[in-house]
Amino acid sequence: QGFLISHTGESRIRALVPGIGRDVARGISMLHADIRRQTASAAARSIAAAAKTSADELLVERIALGDRLAMEALFARHRTPVYRWLVRFVNDAALAEDLLSEVFLDVWRQAGRFEGRSTVSTWLLSIARYKALAARRRRTDAELDELVEATVADTSDDPETALATKPRNEALRQ
């Protein structure tokens, strides 16, 4: 059937453009058929995305009413992409797991505040981003690399200065 459509398109193209070669007309016809298939496929993906978004929004509405099953469904659907994003952002798998829990705890607590101005996945990632940035600010165990270490000024006295000020410090203590 694809050959028939392609062949029919080829005849039409040759009729519209006198002097065009058969191979060129066949190529153009095949290209048009491929574009039609891609357009149909893109439309199907858009419909599927709209259905998923609608389903996510319904889940958030049900979560706002206290539906635990809806929360489990939303968590099952979005935990992997949110977790992977968090791991890339904080570069620590254990911290990413903790933040993932915090994200979905916030979803449970604040589902009623979801306004639908964005998709649910965008809303989840914005919560995750806020949590990850806060975790980065709190992080005190970050290791110093040589570049950062070189920029930190050493305010302590060198050994000679310490010996020179020792008598004065002893006098002040008395």
Image: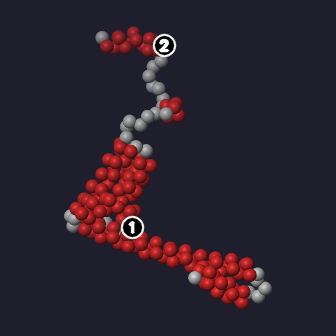
| Left or right of residue 165: residue 19 | right
The first of marks 1 and 2 along the sequence is 1
For the point 38% across and 49% down, which residue is it?
A: 132
Residue 70's quadrant in the figure? bottom left
Q: What amino acid is labelled 1 in the image?
A: Ser
- What residue did someone put label 2 on? 160
- What residue did someone put label 1 on? 118
Q: Quadrant of the C terminus?
A: top left
- Secondary structure of the residue carrying tag 1 is loop
What is the x, y in percent for residue 125?
39, 58
- Secondary structure of the residue carrying tag 2 is helix
User: Closest to the observer: 163 or 143?
Assistant: 143
| Left or right of residue 87: residue 20 | right
Q: Residues within 10 Å of mark 1 (few under 14, many from 20)?
A: few
| Residue 88 seen in render | yes
For the point 64% across and 76% down, which residue is it?
A: 31
Q: What amino acid is labelled 2 in the image?
A: Glu
For the point 30% across and 70% down, which residue is it?
A: 58
Q: Closer to the camera: disc 1 or disc 2?
A: 1
Above or below, 150 relative to 171: below
For the point 27% across and 69% down, which residue is it?
A: 61
Residue occupying the far left of the picture: 66
Q: Report if the CB atoms under discs 1 and 2 are less than 8 Å apart.
A: no
